[in-house]
Amino acid sequence: MSIHVSEPGRPIGTRLPDAFRSRRVGDVTELKESSAISTDHNEATDAEFQQAANSGRHRALQEYSTAAAGERRDERVYLPVSEITSPAQYSIPATATMSQALAAMEDYGVHHLVVLSDDNVAGLIDLRWLLNWVNEHRAEADTQRLLHIELPAFLTAFPETDAHQLARLMLAHRLNAALVVAPGGKPVGIVTSTDYLKLYASASRHEGAV
């Protein structure tokens, strides 16, 4: 359930950390308690989840789901990032030009694109970074390819990564999105700051109704 930061670099080959390419099930060393343990009701703490994970990821998730039933998602000690992930994702080859990347975002109506190099994840770019680059290199936008540009750092996480821990790292690294990657290195979705806003906005509406 590790979270990794890929440093800025050119999109050559895969830029996914080794943990996402040859995953060992049961590595949950980065899970930490994200809130105080409540004595009023039974909840699955991170420590309990780590013990469960030793006997297999699927069994751990099943045990957590049972323990957390009935709790609001934003109040759970452990919240799988898969529960707030936006499954829709769009990609662009590293050979595309900056203008083509900007046009793709406009066509798809998205603010993030996964950059692929020979079908390998080579980066994650957002609209703000792209607009800043185009503004500074206006004359080169139609000819300069992503392949020859240092792409920004990006976060990668597993579907069962703790969403609270991911949020803290997104804030720490000043990144508004993270790529969710399944075993084998296949991207399965993107988590953005908007997904977190939707989560807590939904919780606020629930409180208002009560």
Image: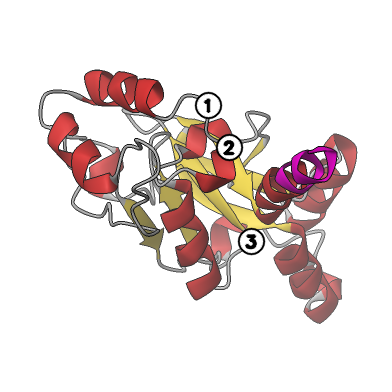
Mainly helix, strand or loop, the magenta region?
helix
Residue type at tag 2: Arg
Tag 1 residue: 70
Numbered marks: total: 3
Q: Residues within 10 Å of mark 1 (few under 14, many from 20)?
A: few
Point out the tag, 1 or 3, that comes first from the N-terminus.
Answer: 1
Classify the position of the N terminus by image quarter: top left
Q: Residues within 10 Å of mark 2 (few under 14, many from 20)?
A: few
Residue 140 place in picture, x, y as percent: 79, 69
Q: Is residue 8 above or below residue 123?
A: below
The mark lying in front, picked from 3 and 2, is 2
**Residue 176, numbered label:** 3
Classify the position of the C terminus by image quarter: top right
- Camera-nearest residue between 86 and 100: 86
Q: Can residue 132 be seen in the rendering of this structure?
A: yes
Question: Which residue is depicted at the point 27% across and 19% down?
Answer: 58
Residue type at tag 1: Gly
The magenta segment is 203-210
Question: Which residue is depicted at the point 40% across and 61% down?
Answer: 6
Q: Is residue 159 above or below residue 69?
A: below
Q: Measure the C-alpha gap from mark 1 to mark 3.
A: 29 Å
Q: Residues within 10 Å of mark 3 (few under 14, many from 20)?
A: some
Q: Measure the C-alpha gap from mark 3 to mark 2.
A: 24 Å
Residue type at tag 3: Asn
Q: Are marks 3 and 2 in contact (CB under 8 Å)?
A: no
Tag 2 residue: 72
Whether the magenta-drawn stretch holds residue 198 is answered as no
Residue 131 place in picture, x, y as percent: 81, 67
Find numbered disc 1 in the image and state the secondary structure of the residue it sits on.
Answer: loop
Find numbered disc 2 in the image and state the secondary structure of the residue it sits on.
Answer: loop
